[in-house]
């Protein structure tokens, strides 16, 4: 309801701004860029306040809950394999659909393209060399999620290695995890108001007017996202998790709504953890391991955007893309999505890496920049859905999925303990 009222309010304000331009500056300053912006930022900040400590604690708890180094390696291999595999399939599907539809085919190259400053994308070696935080406090203060996850992995692996001697530390970490999840519950009580402000602000500023080739680009990207959800995620849930996909989506919808409205996988992380454990039935140890990792490295929606946008820009500029370029796009987009932070709009930074790899002009980013904020909401929802799907599949494979919770009941048994 918050999303619906926010959308209606935003479209109304956009129409008012267009009809009476004299009042637009005051409206932008006090309503759209004032009240709505302040309320939306307060809601996002309240969630993001919990992201780093929850990622550190929950991933450490999940690692320690593996019980043995062997089991930890098995779970990690399954999670990483599914994340990388689904991302590679996602960008391949995006390239195929974009080539078939041809959203930029026949378009005239604009006389001047203003791309803004997408920033410089780090190389794979720079990303690898910066994985271990030299200063853990700085990594947490700056919100460097890759470094925070590496720190959590080290803590969890050390707890597993310590065996029974780590009992007290694990209990303290569980207490902190419960405290942070309780704080998530308090923050989420304000979700309808925060979502209303975020959606109203975006639509009031940009409105619904998108035409021509941009409309074809948007349609192609949304179709690729929908096909990936229906084919890839649907197959994984029905085939490996052995669950009805429609029921899974209904139980997971709260996380999807927050992801769609905030355009941030990181900001949605606490909600995703809560939904997986208390509405889907995934055990705490699996959810706490897979979700924080997925919020940083599993970006199927972002990879799909990079594939469709690259083909669209190439078609607009009349640059042919052969099989060699397609293979490079799949590889680079997969790696780039792994390094993409789960915050709004950062996918454009990684798009620059893909464009540079296949020799396309970086100014082409300006062609998609205007509508990216709206599309960012849809692809973020796909990113978060991918985290939930992988966690559920791995939980089923590890026999740690309480199906009665998914079907609306209470847990038949408590979540697996840290000693399991």
Image (cartoon, rainbow, N blue to C red):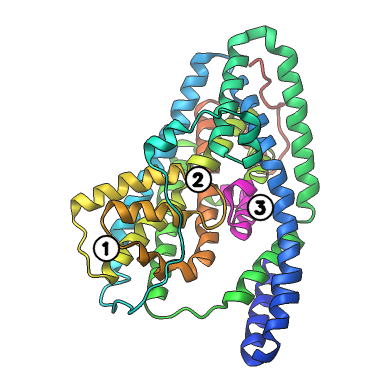
Q: Residue at x 54, y 52 (%)?
A: 246
- In magenta segment, residue 60: no
Report the predominant secondary structure element of the magenta stretch.
helix
Of 196 and 114, nearer the camera is 114
Query: What stretch of residues is rendered in magenta?
Result: 247-268
Q: Residue at x 62, y 32 (%)?
A: 288
> Relative to 294, does residue 65 appear above or below in the rendering?
above
Q: CA distance from mark 1 to mark 2?
A: 24 Å
Instruction: For marks 1 and 3, give the CA distance.
Output: 34 Å
Q: Which residue is mark 3?
A: 254
The residue at which mark 2 appears reads as 386
Q: Is 244 on the left or on the right of 169, as rendered? A: left
Secondary element under disc 3, as helix, strand or loop, is helix
Rendered image: mark on residue 182? none
Q: Are marks 1 and 2 in contact (CB under 8 Å)?
A: no
Please report whichever mark, 1 or 2, sits nearer to the chain's N-terminal start.
1
- The vertical placement of 330 against 42, above or below, is above
Indicate the position of residue 377 as horizontal and vertical percent values: 55, 60
Q: Quadrant of residue 77?
A: top left
* C-alpha distance separating marks 3 and 2: 14 Å
Looking at the rendered structure, the secondary structure element under dot 2 is helix
Write down the residue under mark 1. Answer: 99
| Percent coordinates x, y for residue 230 in the rendering | 44, 54
Is 387 placed above or below 93 here?
above
């Amino acid at each position: 309801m918050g999303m619906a009222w926010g959308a209606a309010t935003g479209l109304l304000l956009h129409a008012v701004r267009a009809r009476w331009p004299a009042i637009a500056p005051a409206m932008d300053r006090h309503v759209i860029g004032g009240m709505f912006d302040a309320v939306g930022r307060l809601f996002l900040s309240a969630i993001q306040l919990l992201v780093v400590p929850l990622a550190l604690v929950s991933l450490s708890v999940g690692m320690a809950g593996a019980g043995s180094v062997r089991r930890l390696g098995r779970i990690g291999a399954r999670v990483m394999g599914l994340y990388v595999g689904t991302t590679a399939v996602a960008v391949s599907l995006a390239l195929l659909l974009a080539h078939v539809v041809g959203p930029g085919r026949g378009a005239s190259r604009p006389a001047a393209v203003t791309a803004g400053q997408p920033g410089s994308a780090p190389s794979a070696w720079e990303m690898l060399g910066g994985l271990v935080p030299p200063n853990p406090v700085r990594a947490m203060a700056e919100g460097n999620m890759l470094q925070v996850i590496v720190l959590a992995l080290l803590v969890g692996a050390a707890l597993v290695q310590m065996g029974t001697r780590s009992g007290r530390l694990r209990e303290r970490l569980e207490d902190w995890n419960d405290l942070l999840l309780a704080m998530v519950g308090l923050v989420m009580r304000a979700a309808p108001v925060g979502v209303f402000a975020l959606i109203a602000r975006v639509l009031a500023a940009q409105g619904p007017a998108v035409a021509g080739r941009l409309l074809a680009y948007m349609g192609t990207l949304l179709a690729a996202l929908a096909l990936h959800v229906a084919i890839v995620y649907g197959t994984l849930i029905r085939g490996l998790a052995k669950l009805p996909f429609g029921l899974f989506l209904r139980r997971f919808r709260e996380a999807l709504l927050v992801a769609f409205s905030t355009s941030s996988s990181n900001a949605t992380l606490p909600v995703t953890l809560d939904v997986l454990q208390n509405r889907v039935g995934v055990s705490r140890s699996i959810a706490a391991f897979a979700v924080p990792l997925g919020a940083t490295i599993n970006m199927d929606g972002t990879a799909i955007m990079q594939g469709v946008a690259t083909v669209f820009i190439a078609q607009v500029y009349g640059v042919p893309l052969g099989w060699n370029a397609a293979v490079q796009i799949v590889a680079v987009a997969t790696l780039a999505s792994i390094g993409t932070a789960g915050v709004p709009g950062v996918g454009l930074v990684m798009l620059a890496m893909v464009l540079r790899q296949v020799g396309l002009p970086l100014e082409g980013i300006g062609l998609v920049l205007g509508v990216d904020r709206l599309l960012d909401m849809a692809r973020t929802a796909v990113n978060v859905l991918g985290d939930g799907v992988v966690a559920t599949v791995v939980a089923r494979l590890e026999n740690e999925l309480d199906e009665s919770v998914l079907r609306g009941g209470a847990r038949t048994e408590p979540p697996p303990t840290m000693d399991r």
